Amino acid sequence: MRANARRTVAPPAELPRTRALVIFGALALLFVVLIGRSLYLQWVENDFLRGQGEARFSREIEVPAHRGRIVDRNGAALAISTPVKSLWVFRDQIDATSAEIASLARVLDTTPREIASQLKGDGEFAFVARQLPPETAERAMKLGIKGLNEQNEYRRYYPGGDVTAQIVGFTGDKDLGQEGIELAQQQWLGGTPGSRRVIINRRGDIVEDVAAIRAPQAGRDLALSIDSRLQYLAFRELKAGIERTRAKAGSLCILDAKTGEILALANWPTYNPNRRDKVARERMRNRALTDTFEPGSTMKPFTIAAALEAGKVRADTVIHTEAGALTIGPNTIHDAHRAGPLTVAQVIQKSSNVGAAKIGLSLPSETLWRMFSEAGFGTKPSTGYPGEVSGRLRAPSTWKPIEQATMSYGHGLSVSLVQLARAYTIFADDGELKPVTLLKTEGAVAGRPVISAETARKVRHMLELVTLPGGTAPQAQVAGYHVAGKTGTARKVEGREYTRKYVASFVGMAPATHPRLVVAIMIDEPTGGDYYGGSVAGPIFSNVMGAALRMLGVPTDAPIDNVVLPPPGSEIEEES
């Protein structure tokens, strides 16, 4: 038998028929399942899947609205919005190394820790920095940090700075009003933000604007009653007066006697709303509307007016001032100077506490309270300013005789400066109390009658005597104009005790024949050696009123050389 005999090769094994059918059936079933799942996802779960896709690549972001301007009565800008940039991220899309975070912190003048805290907060969207100068945002974007985006916004700028700070207020990071008119008129100024939908890539960068979902609606401009020229004048003179008297604080209000518009409202101390870092909260207070004080002798004209209206006295009625002292129970009221018998007009001119107390006590308590109440004391002046106060005026049923006597010359009640200025429109506008406003008005404004025109004119004539030699405020005279006004000097109350700290005030009007302006001044705690209203607030009034009348072109009603000061070295009457 041969060694190279042909090798026998076995035929390939065949798949059993049963197994083949099983495998084929399984593949067919899997194919059917895949087709069914595809149809299910395409038709049944379509909305869900589309939402998941959009959640990963489509986002909705806010589009800020342009905030309306605040302007003065002549159109000068008091608050405007300027374009700025803000940096933002989607927290799940940001991808930055520690070195990049450090670089970004240097550009933004902050710390890496502060930026890290912004990125670790709740929610998918986060601002990294708000209201940046465009050049700063540009430097930040050049770092190329994945997921860092920018958007256009607006930042509020206040051209008046510290001069109008407490009136206008300011906005916060979200451009919402935080103080002053910005807060009070938020709905008018703020507008409505819009929104837009964008497509982002896997790095978090915006690659396409899809659509505007809601267009932003810009806010509306607002014209205030403030006259920027008078506001600067009031601020300058108030600051100078406070520095001269080394006072703690002060306020000054200028009212249009015919419309009740607030033409100027100055406060000191103040702040710069464009740079609010580390500003003490008390500097932001609009003291003329939010703080109260005992008005002192500036209340005496209302006591006299109530007595004239009731027919208890006439201008020439003689009041015996009891040698400058009046005892009521265990208490004694004093005058600064012993004057003897005084007419009612001289009670105002000399500012006699005893005379005012005796006149006040001659009236029923309800009559005196009604005069004070109808003059606006004890109620808010309704300017709409946030935080304005009503002051304190107790019900007459609670008054004791000594309290009625002291209220007659301005102790035992409290007022704001704007309340006091408004009340004097009764004497400036022939008995009508004007509504006060911080918004510009057009045309004449009707007041509410409180006293007769005859009584108003009589009291106004008495107030003229205050600024002449023999009165308590000769330093309040204005060249070329007759002036009517009243001084006030009141000791401050701390707790339940009167202190040796004082509030000096003056409220006056000019031209006295037909008043155009009412100016009210309050100086808190003068410490320059003098604390009387006539010598502390009187000169400020003279400077402000004279310049304001000339600025407004108000015709003179007196000779230009009408100012008559007491002889040098002579004693000036002062209220106690």
Image (spheres, rainbow, N blue to C red):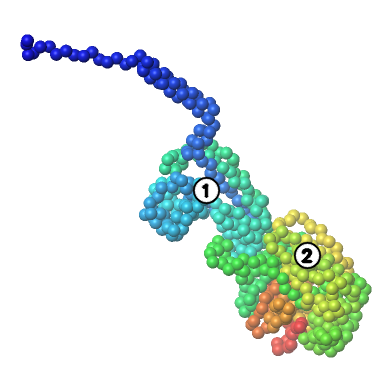
Give the image location of residue 472, x and y in percent: 76, 81
Residue ID for mark 2:
379
Residue at image position (64%, 52%) is 189
**Mark 2 is on which residue type?**
Thr
Report whether residue 406 is seen: yes
**Are the residues flagged by discs 1 and 2 in contact, CB closer than 8 Å?**
no
How many residues crowd around disc 1 within 10 Å: few (fewer than 14), some, or many (20 or more)?
Answer: few
Amino acid type, residue under disc 1 in the picture? Gly
Residue 434 position within the rendered picture, expressed as x and y whole percent measured from the top left:
79, 62
Res. 31 visible in picture: no
Residue 3 to residue 282: above or below: above
Residue depth check, mark 1 versus mark 2: number of the one nearer the observer: 1
Residue 137 lies, in percent from the top left, at 45, 52
Q: Nearer the viewer, residue 150 or 234?
A: 150
Of the numbered discs 1 and 2, the one sitting upstream in the chain is 1
Q: Position of residue 287 (x, y in %)?
A: 67, 68
Residue at the farthest left position: 2
Residue at figure coordinates x 39%, y 56% from the top left: 102
Q: Nearer the viewer, residue 97 or 268?
A: 97
Q: Residue at x 63, y 60 (%)?
A: 179
* Image quadrant in which the C terminus is located: bottom right
506 vs 9: above or below:
below
Which quadrant holds the N terminus?
A: top left
Mark 1 vs mark 2, CA separation in Å: 46 Å
The image quadrant that residue 541 belongs to is bottom right
Q: Residue at x 59, y 62 (%)?
A: 160
Q: Which residue is mark 1?
A: 123
Viewer-side residue, 188 vs 319: 188
How many numbered marks appear?
2
Q: Which mark is residue 134?
A: none
